[in-house]
Image (spheres, helix red, strand yellow):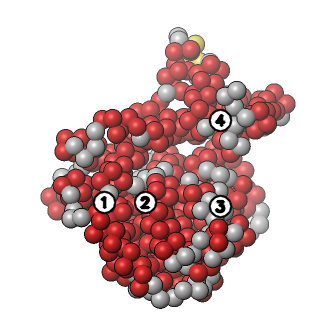
């Protein structure tokens, strides 16, 4: 059987309930309501893991094409000539979305960090320099994640496959092993730093995690492209509060979960041994580093600032990929084996397509008006109303196991409601974008990297949830103070 019966049954029941039982609300078209039924069913299937997310996406595309819910009965008073053909075009429409390809190709490029060993080298180099104390090891792990985050859209690969093995080898070298009951020596602290650094870096760069480009897309749709968060705009807005959070996080966790071992000369020795074993930087590593720096240079818009030459962010990503292929750092077989990238393109396209048509058919606008009317009745003003919307959006992540599913399900309506309350569009976009990252700190299933790091056994579930909630509050306070002040300096409100 290709699906899990219970979550699949729940998803099917929800779909049928909305489609056939719940009456279409006033002001909503039957088409929009039926598409909502399909959308809720697909999201429920993703949350319940009825099938892998890519398989659920294919199911969503198929159902949209079969039911024709996106195709109007009349266009300019005339029946649509080929409704079935139009339905499949609509269902596949987001496959030409440049942001989707940007994130998919960037995931393939990030494979080069693993294949060449450059990611590991960066991590061990930092620990060899700053790892004499446990706190220094924590900061080294955080900085390592920060260095590779811009070109690693899979935070699972970054936190789980590159930084986590380094963290684990250091913990075990100090005999901090969950199987021996000695995780409190150093491993618990380092595991939490490993995870929360991973999440904070997701906030700083558009290309650090898959849901971020979806946020960009939904903001553009909601504002008729008046607000477009480019790579450089996002980075400039998030880097100051993000670095403040990255600076404080290891300290806060150090006091919350104080490691028994505070001096770690063995860590620097281990890192130096690993670097010695790796040998001098190989040709492939140097090329990968050069491509990495070139991508940052172009994504940040430096040619435009200096010479007036604009290069699209997705074009830049394809250039990086082409250079990886031309230099042999990656082969086409490597690209084909990067299943996560192709999987991301498929499910991203399906969810963006459904979200786009929910917006076009007026349902997101209707939901936004409904939320706005409810909050207006509280007499909070746009500031209080938007804070309430953001907090509800953020902490709703306790019931989500996928950042992308959460963003697709809630971001559009909540952002639209904030605009209807009178929030400055750019300010509220940045608030919601920050919340999208912060929410992934909460649980042991909140993002792709959390099960990997939590699964290593250094941290109990209670400790993980406690640390996640405290870090979410700390990051909210940072963005509500340093973030707002910095965005004021940038002229975003």
Q: Position of residue 249 (x, y in %)?
A: 53, 78
Which type of secondary structure does the marked residue at label 2 adopt? helix
Determine whether 438 is above or below 311 in the image: below
Q: Nearer the viewer, mark 1 or mark 4?
A: 1
Q: CA distance from mark 4 to mark 2?
A: 27 Å
**Residue 51 - label:** 4
Kindly indicate whether the residue at mark 2 contacts the one at mark 3 (C-beta within 8 angstroms): no
Task: Give how far across and how far down residue 17 sits, in percent.
Answer: 82, 33
What is the crowding at mark 1: few (fewer than 14 residues within 10 Å), some, or many (at least 20)? many
| Label 4: which secondary element | loop
For image coordinates 41% across by 41% down, the residue present is 338
User: In the displayed structure, does residue 46 sit left or right of residue 125?
Assistant: right
Total marks shown come to 4
Q: Residue furthest top?
A: 81
State the separation of the CA atoms marked 3 and 1.
28 Å
Q: Which residue is mark 1?
A: 118
> What x and y, as percent, mark residue 416?
60, 52
Q: Quadrant of residue 1?
A: top right
Reading the chain from its start, which is encountered first: label 4 or label 2?
A: 4
Q: Nearer the viewer, residue 136 or 146?
A: 136
Mark 4: few, some, or many residues within 10 Å (few <14, many ≥20)?
many
Q: Position of residue 153 (x, y in %)?
A: 43, 53
Determine whether, in the image, residue 482 is placed left or right of residue 176. Answer: left
Residue at 66 percent across and 28 percent down: it is 2
Q: Which residue is mark 3?
A: 444
Label located before the other in sequence (3 or 4): 4
Earlier in the chain: of badge 3 and badge 2, it is 2
For the residue pair 360 and 234, the one nearer the viewer reads as: 234
Q: Which residue is mark 2?
A: 162
């Amino acid at each position: 059987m290709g699906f899990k019966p219970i979550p699949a049954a729940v998803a099917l029941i929800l779909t049928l309930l909305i489609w056939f039982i719940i009456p279409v609300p006033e002001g909503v078209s039957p088409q929009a309501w039926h598409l909502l039924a399909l959308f809720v069913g697909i999201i429920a299937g993703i949350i319940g893991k009825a099938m892998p997310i890519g398989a659920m996406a294919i199911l969503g595309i198929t159902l949209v094409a079969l039911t024709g819910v996106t195709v109007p009965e009349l266009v300019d008073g005339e029946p649509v000539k080929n409704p079935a053909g139009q339905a499949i075009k609509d269902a596949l429409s987001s496959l030409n979305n440049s942001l989707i390809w940007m994130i998919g190709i960037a995931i393939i490029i990030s494979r080069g960090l693993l294949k060449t060993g450059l990611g590991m080298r960066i991590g061990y180099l930092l620990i060899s320099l700053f790892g004499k104390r446990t706190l220094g090891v924590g900061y080294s792990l955080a900085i390592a994640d920060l260095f590779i985050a811009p070109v690693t859209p899979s935070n699972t690969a970054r936190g789980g496959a590159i930084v986590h093995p380094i963290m684990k080898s250091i913990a075990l070298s100090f005999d901090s092993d969950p199987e021996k009951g000695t995780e409190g020596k150093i491993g618990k602290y380092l595991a939490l730093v490993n995870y929360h650094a991973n999440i904070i870096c997701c906030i700083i760069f558009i290309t650090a995690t898959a849901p971020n480009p979806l946020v960009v897309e939904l903001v553009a749709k909601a504002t008729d492209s008046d607000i477009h968060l480019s790579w450089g705009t996002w980075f400039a807005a998030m880097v100051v509060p993000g670095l403040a959070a990255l600076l404080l996080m290891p300290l806060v966790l150090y006091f919350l979960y104080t490691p028994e071992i505070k001096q770690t000369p063995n860590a620097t020795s281990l890192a130096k041994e690993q670097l010695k074993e790796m040998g001098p930087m190989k040709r492939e590593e140097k090329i990968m580093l050069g491509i990495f720096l070139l991508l940052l240079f172009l994504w940040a818009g430096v040619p435009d600032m200096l010479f007036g030459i604009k290069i699209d962010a997705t074009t830049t990503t394809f250039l990086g990929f082409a250079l990886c292929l031309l230099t042999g750092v990656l082969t086409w077989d490597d690209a084909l084996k990067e299943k996560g990238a192709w999987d991301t393109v498929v499910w991203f396209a399906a969810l963006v397509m459904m979200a786009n048509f929910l917006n076009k058919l007026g349902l997101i606008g209707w939901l936004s008006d409904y939320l706005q009317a409810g909050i207006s009745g509280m007499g909070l003003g746009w500031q209080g109303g938007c804070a309430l919307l953001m907090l509800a959006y953020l902490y709703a992540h306790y019931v989500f196991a996928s950042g992308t599913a959460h963003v697709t399900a809630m971001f559009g309506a909540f952002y639209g409601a904030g605009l209807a309350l009178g929030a400055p569009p750019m300010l509220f976009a940045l608030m919601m974008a920050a919340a999208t990252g912060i929410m992934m700190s909460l649980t042991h299933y909140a993002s792709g990297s959390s099960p990997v790091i939590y699964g290593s056994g250094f941290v109990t579930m209670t400790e993980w949830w406690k640390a996640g909630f405290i870090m979410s509050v700390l990051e909210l306070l940072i963005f509500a103070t340093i973030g707002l002040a910095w965005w004021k300096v940038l002229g975003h409100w």
